[in-house]
């Protein structure tokens, strides 16, 4: 809807006060109430409690001590905690950049062969990882990436035996390896979203471009990508959040090891709260993580909105 | 999309939301009832499970058949008792223990490190039962690790807060066929001899030691602690684990041990992918004959007897000097009773039964593979001498003679294993830490965790 029509509708509304006294308005609230109560109890309350806990030193059982913002100080000064935040940002490259860029290329290719059976097969195969639970994906990939796994067997087969290693147990490759698992999982989602977006693009645009002598690359850059601004924004938002809030894949594949090289905030929060029993510090890290996710997701939304105007 | 939420309306929503949040006002932990320390309430006569039907709740570890075998036999002997058992992985039990003990107290529970549970008054003080059943007359070393001072510190003395289903032992398992290949006719008697065998295995193309060290489980702590016991006395290591004031892991003999481990990693005595190997992978490789030695515990004896009959041997870690004292990590398979358990008497009666009943002791050895707890002169089931279980049981007697029982360095605090030993041992393997840095870091983490408590 355009801003103008929305503004017109708002102008026709009665003042809120009368609306609330109106029994029909009350009925409206009644309809919303179940969802609102669920939202308050299962979303707002936990967030508020987490924020409250973050101000205390508490082991989850006994009495607690008020420590104010000290736990937040710890999040940014304790190298173990801070490094986990850095790792989450490194994962964005794998969870976001690869699926979106590769997804664009694959979607563009599939669109060109849209009529063939191959397109259907490709779509299905690419989307399959989305259907598999992340835990199963993590287990399957930790077998593939093991020192005797298929990846190393293939490398040896093509004469690259020298680079084989336990990918998830090596300090240099563990983080990229879990990143690749994430990329594999999210690639299908991005491809499908982008493909859906492409089907909405007016074919006349391509025709016009071709008449003007544009090649495939030109079409892609000047028509496809700009038209997909919304879809790309959704992909980037979803995948950035998946990277920052990652837990399952890493918990299964490396548990943060070796030597904390794959430690991410989600896992760190879990360890802090349930192994070290520092509920306060865990909550502080959780709040920081939430703020970071919002801080990353909001600009992407604005970017998408600007494109719409 | 244009904004359509009017400020006045969102105000109403916020008020409703805040109503739901009202419960969040009190300080965390303040409105839940705090368990009180249970005193040493004297038990007049040894309690029993009575004769009326009774359901005892248990919280056991998945993957270990011993507790189930024991409870089944117990019900056979005491038909009025039925069991309501919940099982979880040990890691899950570790994470859940405080909340489960506080909210839904089981009568009998497999316990992780107990210091913090005692500090929060979540476990029943068993001194009364110990007196009534005569547990205090058992060899003191069996119960030492389960005794805690007031507030949970130090461990090793004070009131009894848990009991073991048996007493497990660790050392070195070896593959007899591969040992013969490298000319090892009997287990090494000194550390130098062990080094020699390791070197021979390496040059013969056999992986000298199979160990796990991946994920959040730093299995190199096993050889490290064995090396510590080779180079120095067990006492100071126990003091550190028991959180005695002033105890440190960073001692000269422990440094020698850590340097020796570093030497082994640099010599390539472990698998190349050790930082990606978990416990199950290590076990399957050892059973498949992929390596000569494996540092592990006698809870696998029964399993190895079944999976590689006649081919698995066991030896204690040799001392650095010929004829020196031997020591081993050996600890009770810890079970405790929740402070607010409904059927505490029956659970205590069960624990006593496990240690004293003839059939229960047989099950403990056959299925558990470890020495049963109980009086020194209690019935000891016979085991065929060619079984590895026989060697581990015999080793248990040797350790008792040398007074060399140590708890596990991973049990010093609730988080020391996952948060300090594991990442730092993984770094040692990768050459990112020296032996000295390893000990310094672990000691710093230990101090920090004790201060945090």
Image (cartoon, rainbow, N blue to C red):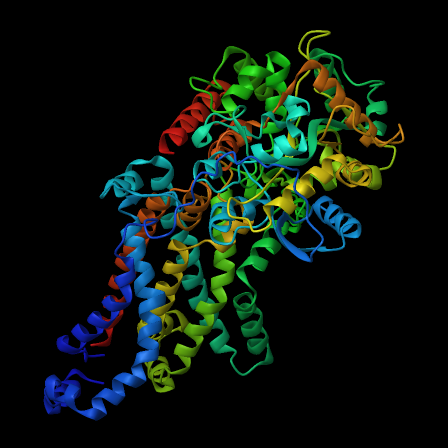
Q: Which image quarter: residue B199?
A: top right
Answer with the quarter of the image where residue B85 lies: bottom right
- Residue A300 visible: no
- Residue nearest the observer in this picture, A21 or B295: A21
**How many numbered discs?**
0
Nearest to the observer: residue B308 or residue A101: B308
Closest to the observer: A150 or A80?
Answer: A80
The one of B137 and B317 positioned closer to us in this rendering = B137
Quarter of the image that includes the C terminus of chain B? top left
Picture coordinates of residue B270 (x, y %)? 65, 29
In-image side of B13 versus A154 (left or right)? left
In the rendered image, the vertical position of residue B359 relative to residue A42, given as above or below? above
Q: Percent position (x, y) of residue B391?
A: 81, 26
Q: Give the residue displayed 59% in from the left and 21% down from the top.
A: B261
Residue B344 in view (yes/no): yes
Residue A30 image position (x, y, % from top left): 29, 84
Relative height, residue B260 to residue A181 (above, below): above
Q: Residue at x 40, y 61 (%)?
A: A239
Q: Residue furthest front?
A: B44
Which residue ends up furthest to the top in the rendered image?
A: B322
Where residue A272 sits: x, y (%)?
A: 41, 43
Q: In which quadrant is the N terminus of chain B drawn?
A: bottom left
């Amino acid at each position: 809807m355009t801003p103008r029509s929305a503004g017109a509708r708002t102008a026709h509304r009665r003042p809120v006060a009368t609306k609330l006294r109106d029994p029909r308005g009350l009925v409206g609230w009644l309809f919303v109430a179940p969802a609102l109560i669920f939202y308050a109890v299962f979303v707002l309350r936990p967030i508020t409690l987490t924020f409250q806990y973050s101000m205390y030193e508490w082991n989850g059982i006994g009495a607690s001590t008020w420590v104010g913002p000290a736990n937040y100080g710890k999040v940014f000064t304790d190298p173990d905690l801070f490094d986990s935040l850095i790792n989450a940002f490194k994962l964005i490259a794998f969870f976001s950049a690869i699926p979106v860029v590769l997804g664009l290329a694959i979607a563009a290719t599939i669109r060109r062969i849209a009529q063939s059976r191959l397109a259907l097969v490709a779509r299905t195969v690419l989307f399959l990882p989305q259907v598999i639970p992340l835990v199963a994906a993590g287990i399957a990939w930790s077998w593939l990436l093991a020192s005797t796994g298929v990846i190393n067997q293939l490398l040896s087969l093509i004469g690259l035996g020298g680079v084989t290693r336990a990918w998830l147990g090596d300090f240099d490759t563990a983080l990229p390896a879990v990143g690749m698992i994430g990329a594999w999982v999210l690639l299908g989602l991005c491809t499908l979203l982008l493909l859906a977006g492409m089907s909405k693009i007016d074919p006349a645009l391509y025709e016009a471009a071709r008449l003007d002598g544009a090649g495939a690359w030109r079409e892609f850059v000047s028509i496809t990508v700009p038209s997909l601004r919304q879809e790309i924004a959704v992909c980037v938002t979803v995948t950035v959040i998946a990277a920052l809030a990652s837990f399952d894949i890493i918990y299964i594949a490396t548990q943060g090891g070796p030597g904390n090289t794959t430690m991410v905030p989600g896992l760190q929060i879990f360890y802090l709260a349930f192994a070290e029993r520092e509920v306060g510090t865990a909550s502080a890290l959780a709040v920081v993580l939430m703020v970071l996710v919002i801080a990353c997701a909001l600009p992407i939304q604005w970017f998408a909105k600007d494109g719409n105007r | 999309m244009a904004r359509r939420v009017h400020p006045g309306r969102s105000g109403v929503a916020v008020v409703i939301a805040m109503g739901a949040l009202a419960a969040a006002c009190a300080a965390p932990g303040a409105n839940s009832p705090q368990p009180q320390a249970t005193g040493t309430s004297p038990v007049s006569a040894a309690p029993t499970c009575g004769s009326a039907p009774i359901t005892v709740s248990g919280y056991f570890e998945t993957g270990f058949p011993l507790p189930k075998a024991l409870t089944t036999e117990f019900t056979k002997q005491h038909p009025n008792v039925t069991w309501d058992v919940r099982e979880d992985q040990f890691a899950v039990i570790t994470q859940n223990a405080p909340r489960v003990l506080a909210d839904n107290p089981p009568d009998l529970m497999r316990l992780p490190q107990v210091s913090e549970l005692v500090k929060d008054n979540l476990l029943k003080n068993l001194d009364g039962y110990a007196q009534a059943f005569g547990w205090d007359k058992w060899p003191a070393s069996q119960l030492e690790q389960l005794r805690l001072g007031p507030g949970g510190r130090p461990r090793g003395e004070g009131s009894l807060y848990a009991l073991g289903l048996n007493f497990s032992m660790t050392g070195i398992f070896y593959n007899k066929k591969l040992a013969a290949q490298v000319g090892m006719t009997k287990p090494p008697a000194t550390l130098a001899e062990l080094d020699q065998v390791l070197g021979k295995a390496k040059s013969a193309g056999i992986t000298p030691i199979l160990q796990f060290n991946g994920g959040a489980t730093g299995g190199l702590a096993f050889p490290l602690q064995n090396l510590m016991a080779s180079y120095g006395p067990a006492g100071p290591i126990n003091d550190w684990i028991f959180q005695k004031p002033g105890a440190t892991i960073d001692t000269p003999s422990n440094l020698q041990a850590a340097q020796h481990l570093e030497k082994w990693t640099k010599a390539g005595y472990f698998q190349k992918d050790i930082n990606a190997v978990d416990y199950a992978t290590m076990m399957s490789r050892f059973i498949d004959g992929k390596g000569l030695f494996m540092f592990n515990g006698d809870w696998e004896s029964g399993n190895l007897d079944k999976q590689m009959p006649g081919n698995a041997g066991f030896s204690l870690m040799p001392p650095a000097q010929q004829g020196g004292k031997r020591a081993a990590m050996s600890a009770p398979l810890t079970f405790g009773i929740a402070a607010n358990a409904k059927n505490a008497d029956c659970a205590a009666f069960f624990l006593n039964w496990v240690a004293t009943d003839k059939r229960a002791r047989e099950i403990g050895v056959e299925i558990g593979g470890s020495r049963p707890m109980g009086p020194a002169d209690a019935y000891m089931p016979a085991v065929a001498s060619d079984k590895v279980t026989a060697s581990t049981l015999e080793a248990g007697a040797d350790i008792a003679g040398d007074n060399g029982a140590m708890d596990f360095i991973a049990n010093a605090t609730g988080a020391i294993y996952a948060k300090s030993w594991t990442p730092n041992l993984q770094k040692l393997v990768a050459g990112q830490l020296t032996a000295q840095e390893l000990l310094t870091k672990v000691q710093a983490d230990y101090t920090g965790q004790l201060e945090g408590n």
